[in-house]
Amino acid sequence: MTIETPTRTRESPDYRDSGLEFPTGFLIGSATASYQIEGAATADGRGPSIWDTFSATPGKIVNGDTGAVADDHYNRLESDLDLMVELGLEAYRFSIAWPRIQPTGSGAVNEAGLDFYRRLVDGLIARGIRPIATLYHWDLPQALEDAGGWTNRETAYRFAEYARHVAEALGDRVPVWTTLNEPWCSAFLGYGSGAHAPGRTDGAAALAAMHHLNLAHGLAVQVLREVVPQAEVSVTLNFHVVRGDGDGSAEAVRRIEALANRSFTQPMLVGGYPVDLIEDTSSVTDWSFVLPGDTEIIRQPLDFLGVNYYSTTRVRMWDGVSPRERADGHKDVGGSPWPGSDGVEFLHQEGPYTAMGWNIAPDGLEGLLLSLSREHPDLPLMITENGAAFADEVIGDRVFDDERVDYLRRHFTAAHRAMEQGVDLRGYLVWSLLDNFEWGYGFSKRFGIVHVDYETQRRTIKDSGLWVARLIDGHVIPE
């Protein structure tokens, strides 16, 4: 997949447009993930997840933070739902914690866990907010990891069973389902680089996990089509917008783009794995984990594709002599999320940057949407995550975050420009509703449009949240 570089210049070159109108029916909302906000890690029969284990391991998370309490959303559900109304959210994307439904990842259903999501969905519907449920946002039951996790083919079948339980319980009220969130992170950061749970650093394991996540997606889509045939079904991928630097960089772009993007889009949307990806990783694995019939299971019709975008990536082939740059935007704990591509280096990019150190490049979002629309013209798109971490300024009852407002304005502008060029974009979900547990960075990074005081759990709508509320109210990008 070649990412387009926008060339139009009639609008502001910095993407700071205003007054742009989004059509009726275009969903504007926000998103969260279960482990990042729920807390209540042992309440009502919930079992441990790989993130509970990983977070409790010394040295894995900044400041030793864990999601045991997080935003205490589990116990503050009603007030958080009211907060969504105050923001005017049209849609809310949440994830379901597998260990709440099946504490060990298989066997009997924990009705108390399902009851929480019943209350959540009913509360959203009562408030006129469209529920978008994600089945998996990284919190694999620890018991399944003990049996091999995503490197074990059986995990994909356990996931399909879990999907059936949830769909049967909530399918009559949830109109939109997402199978997986960012399986690239689950596979390559969880099993390759070690930056995410379960913290393994094995390239072959990462590739096996990638395939079994793809298989789990396909099996879950089949289940959802059977149980809730009236629902929309999707998957959410985090796309790397890869750009080359200098002569001969095309090879570096090809390699990383294959690992980061086509390892999921081709099997899910086209069929089979890219030949060049298999060749690039032949020294890492023999791909024997792919069994006859798998590729047919993985490729399932989707109602739309979820697109997560934050920044761009710049690469070139390493000369083998100079110090190798590794600025791929992911936490470096010693392992590599790029099996078979040790000869690629990731270059530092020009700022400005978010608090994560990620460059701000709204043109990357526009180009990505255009490229996906060109390559899959019959598949609608939805931005399921976009947002930024910044250091907020809290003064009294107000939270000033001008940088986040500017970031969102520029990226909503990029989305609007893509739509003007024919992209079938159905919605835009801002990441994130609340400040929360930011994985390996703990509570040190804030992405929310609502500020959370972690000592008191007090919520305060930031200036960015007020800006989003104005945007939703008029469906026009505010001044």
Image (cartoon, rainbow, N blue to C red):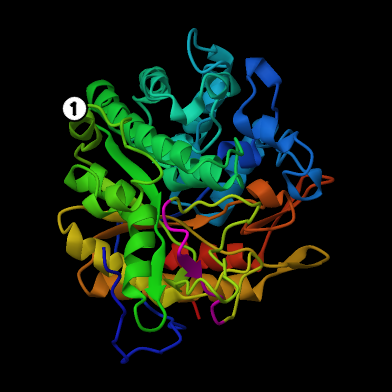
Q: Main secondary structure of the magenta part?
A: loop
- On the question of residue 94 being in view, the answer is yes
In the rendered structure, the answer to whether residue 308 lies left or right of residue 33 reads: left
Residue drawn at point x = 30 percent, y = 70 percent:
3
Above or below for 43 versus 208: above
Left-right relation of 398 to 438? right
Q: Tell me the quadrant of the picture where the N terminus can be found.
A: bottom left
Which residue: 56% across, 55% down? 87
Question: Residue 220: x and y, percent?
Answer: 32, 28
Q: From the viewer's perspective, is 33 left or right of 19? A: right
* Front-lying residue, 378 or 140: 140
Q: Position of residue 366 (x, y in %)?
A: 34, 72
Dividing the picture into quarters, in which one does residue 212 lie? top left
Question: Where 402 sits versus 286, above or below?
Answer: below
Question: Which residues fall within the magenta stretch?
Answer: 340-350
- Where residue 333 appears, as percent x and y from the top left, is 66, 52
* Residue 22 in view (yes/no): no
Image height of 414 relative to 447, above or below: below
Magenta-span inclusion, residue 394: no
Q: Which residue is mark 1?
A: 293
Seen from this angle, which residue lies furthest left?
Answer: 378
Q: Quadrant of residue 230?
A: top left
> Observer-nearest residue: 56 or 27?
56
For mark 1, does the 10 Å Cα neighbourhood hold few (<14), some (14 to 19), or many (20 or more) residues?
A: few
